[in-house]
Amino acid sequence: LFNIDDYLNRLVTKLAKFDHPVNIVMVSDHGMTEISEKRKIHLPAKVTNNTKLKIVGRGALSLIYTAKNKELTKLALSDLSAVKNINLYTKENVPERFHFNKNERIPEITVSPKLGYYISKGDKKVKGGSHGYDPRNRDMHGVFFAIGPNIKPAKIDSFENIHIYPFITSILNISPNPDIDGKKEVLEKYIK
């Protein structure tokens, strides 16, 4: 195992010896949660064996494409409704917090298991950790650490990673691409 704390300490210590201001921003793209055999989910055979359906992904998210066939979508939703510990979303009701509802490639059905449950195919063993669950679950929140001459020290609440890009462009005093979801206002109070 690598000791990340030790590496970060060495980096900060060595940078402090230079006569040049440096800002460090360290992030993770997501959190993790524990999964196990006890929380394994199998989708119904009526769904997985239906050759008219295209199923993409397992684990914390399965996307089901029905070629925009409303009757097939309705039938698959009915078969899936009996599965415990999942949330089902149609293309029209995917939560805004998923940032997943404004694209033509969105599937007709999104299957999102509850935190720690895992959609498995076949006899594959389920153990360890996974990500990709609903972002409102605290386990899915990533790491954000920033230090430097342009950053105010503070402990901050969780926020979406989309706001890091405008934070960094502000620190660098450059104009961000205007066509982004991130908002400068979310983190600007932490900039000196």
Image (tube, grey):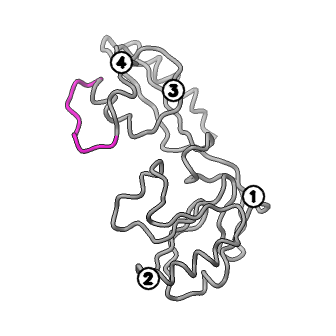
Tell me the quarter of the picture where residue 148 sits: top left
Q: Residues within 10 Å of mark 3 (few under 14, many from 20)?
A: few
Tell me the quarter of the picture where residue 126 sits: bottom right
Disc number for residue 36: 1
Instruction: Name the residue beneath numbered marker 3.
Output: 8
Tags 1 and 3 touching, CB below 8 Å: no
Sequence-first disc among 2 and 4: 2
Q: What is the three-letter code of the residue carrying label 4?
A: Ile
Q: What is the three-letter code of the residue carrying label 3?
A: Leu
- The x, y position of residue 99, in whole percent, is 42, 51
User: Which circle, 2 or 3, is nearer the viewer?
Assistant: 2
> Residue extending furthest left?
175
Sequence-first disc among 1 and 3: 3
Sequence-first disc among 1 and 4: 1
Position of the C terminus, as image quadrant, is: top left
Front-most of residues 93 and 128? 93
